[in-house]
Image: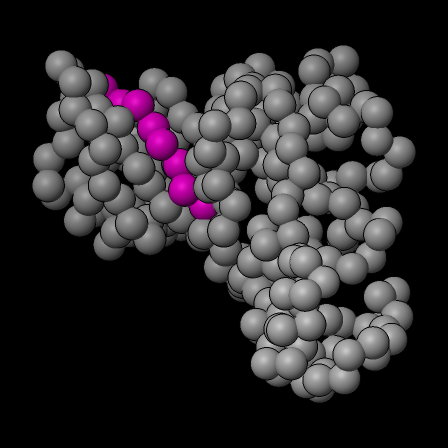
Amino acid sequence: MASRRSCEEMIGEGRVTVDGQVVRRFGARVDPAKQVIHVDGKRLPTMPDLVYFAINKPIGVVSTMSDPEGRQSLADYVADRTERLFHVGRLDTETEGLILLTNDGELANRLTHPSYGVQKKYWAKVPGRIKPEVARRLKKGVELEDGIAKADSFTVVQEHGQQSLVEIVLHEGRKHIVRRMLEEVGHPVIDLARIEFGPVKLGRLKPGTVRALTVKEVGDLYAAVGM
């Protein structure tokens, strides 16, 4: 989290809680397997056997930890890990971008449960220039075969020739939801990538690359789902 000196300052300032109680005594002992520690209201990952990763899933890889058809899956990128990892959310085979991997089952369940409303941000390349009414329709909600789907936000990132790059933010995860919404408003997807999952950003992570989440990112994920 920080240097010993900085941590002592945090404790002295009353910024650290254990099981909901402010701790001001230096050297107080805690059991990380049983007690919950927060700093500035954000929970710290303290269980040494829990791991948290981000992967930039390439196009052509299935969003599962195994595949009966023998296709390349997420498991191929973490084959050296001994933990039983869960993938948090899915991306269809032809979509690339950010997926989280963890063995923290409670966090994984909350991140994917619609009641917590964790937002996901996507960039999509689509044909044509975007008219103003497209954003209004997507944010108001479009009718799909399985019900109304609404975008939390929609912006045009760039227009080049007869193609546009758009950004769409959703908090639900129905199958092919982004592709179906954009097709419904007349802009079928050419390329699609998820660039953010809640507070975690894809950044410059290359396709097929895995990185460990930072302590801050894990704390932000806990906060996003009320843990």
Left or right of 117 in this view: 83: right
Quarter holding the N terminus? bottom right
Would you place residue 197 above or below residue 218 in this image? above
Residue located 46% across and 33% down the image = 203
Based on the displayed image, in which of its 4 quarters is residue 5 positioned? bottom right
The percent coordinates of residue 148 (x first, y second) are 36, 51
Residue located 64% across and 43% down the image = 213
| Residue 92 seen by the camera | no
The percent coordinates of residue 209 (x first, y second) are 62, 23
Q: Is residue 55 magenta?
A: no
Closest to the observer, 156 or 1: 1
* Total marks placed: 0
Based on the displayed image, in which of its 4 quarters is residue 122 positioned? top left
Residue located 60% across and 77% down the image = 15
What is the chief secondary structure element of the magenta stretch?
A: strand
Would you place residue 96 above or below residue 156 in this image? above
Closest to the observer, 95 or 3: 3
Left or right of 72 in this view: 94: left
Tell me which segment is drawn in magenta: 120-127
| Residue 160 seen by the camera | yes
Quarter holding the C terminus? bottom right
Would you place residue 213 above or below residue 72 in this image? below
The percent coordinates of residue 123 (x first, y second) are 36, 32
